[in-house]
Image: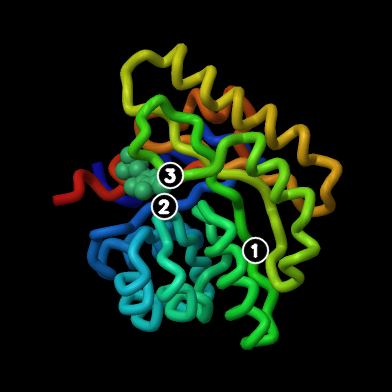
Amino acid sequence: MSIATAIEQIRHELPSTVQLVAVSKFKPVEDIRLAYDAGQRAFGENRPQELALKAPLLPADIQWHFIGHLQTNKVKLILPYVTLIHSVDSERLLAEIDKQASALSKTVDCLLEVHIARETTKQGFLPEEAEAIARHMGEYPNVRLRGVMGMATFTDDFEEVRQEFRTLKALSQRLSDIPGCDQVSMGMSEDWRIAVEEGTTIVRIGTFIFGKRN
Ligand SMILES: *Cc1c(COP(=O)(O)O)cnc(C)c1O
């Protein structure tokens, strides 16, 4: 299936209220250009250096989403490009994003990454930690909290995946009194339809669009 066809197919099924982020990590700029020509504007990258290399080579109206683990010393590198950082997984990182954004007189949109999976390898806050942080975002005036992000367990037990997405969605609903904090980023190539059923607002899809990564 071509990149354009894959995007078309997802768009056809995706409710208009859900945003598609095309995850282009490890893929060449030529592939991103093909997706762009098919009308796609939001792309996800997970390595700071790779984002900083690709972004200047591609059209300026692309919205870059950062979806990977971010080290504090790499924040500066990605801030000129990012629309939304999905993967804030520590308060130290939050403080650094705030500091660097302030230096650029910017406000940066962020999601708190929440650990919903069974695997201990995955990053993120416990739901109650994320909720506590969301309640004192005043400490970070140059960060705008837009919601939460999570990754389900890598399993073909779709009932488990659904329960994990429900946990994240429930947290998001508890935070819905915070102005602008209305986004839930969940769902990838294998599980995005379940995420849609459970009320996601952003899906992050790579393999289905661009093919397997080497
Ligand atoms: C790689 C990645 C994706 C996309 O995964 P696919 O299975 O290729 O769709 C989504 N979210 C995050 C955080 C990722 O690292």
Q: In which quarter of the image is ligand 1?
A: top left
User: Residue 94 location in percent, x, y?
Assistant: 59, 63
Q: Distance between the residues labelled 1 and 2?
A: 18 Å
Q: Earlier in the sequence, mark 2 or mark 3?
A: 2
Residue type for callout 3: Gln
In the rendered image of this protein, does residue 168 appear above or below residue 140? above
Which quarter of the figure has residue 212? top left
Which numbered disc, 2 or 3, marks the residue closer to the eye?
3
Per the image, label 1 sits on a secondary structure element best described as strand
State whether residue 18 appears in this view.
Answer: no
Q: Which residue is drawn at 33% across and 64% down?
A: 47
Image location (x, y in percent) of residue 160? 45, 16
Tell me residue 152's x, y (percent): 44, 30
Q: Is mark 2 within 8 Å of ligand 1?
A: no
- Given this view, does label 1 or label 3 mark the residue nearer the observer? 3
Is 50 located above or below residue 163 in the figure?
below
Return the residue at label 2: 22
- Left or right of 214 in this view: 153: right
Q: What residue type is labelled 1?
A: Asp
How far apart, in angstroms, are the residues tagged by discs 1 and 3?
19 Å
Residue tagged by mark 1? 109
Q: How far apart are marks 2 and 3 (CA)?
A: 21 Å
- Is residue 112 at least partly visible in the picture? yes
- Give the amino acid type for the residue marked by disc 2 in the picture: Ala
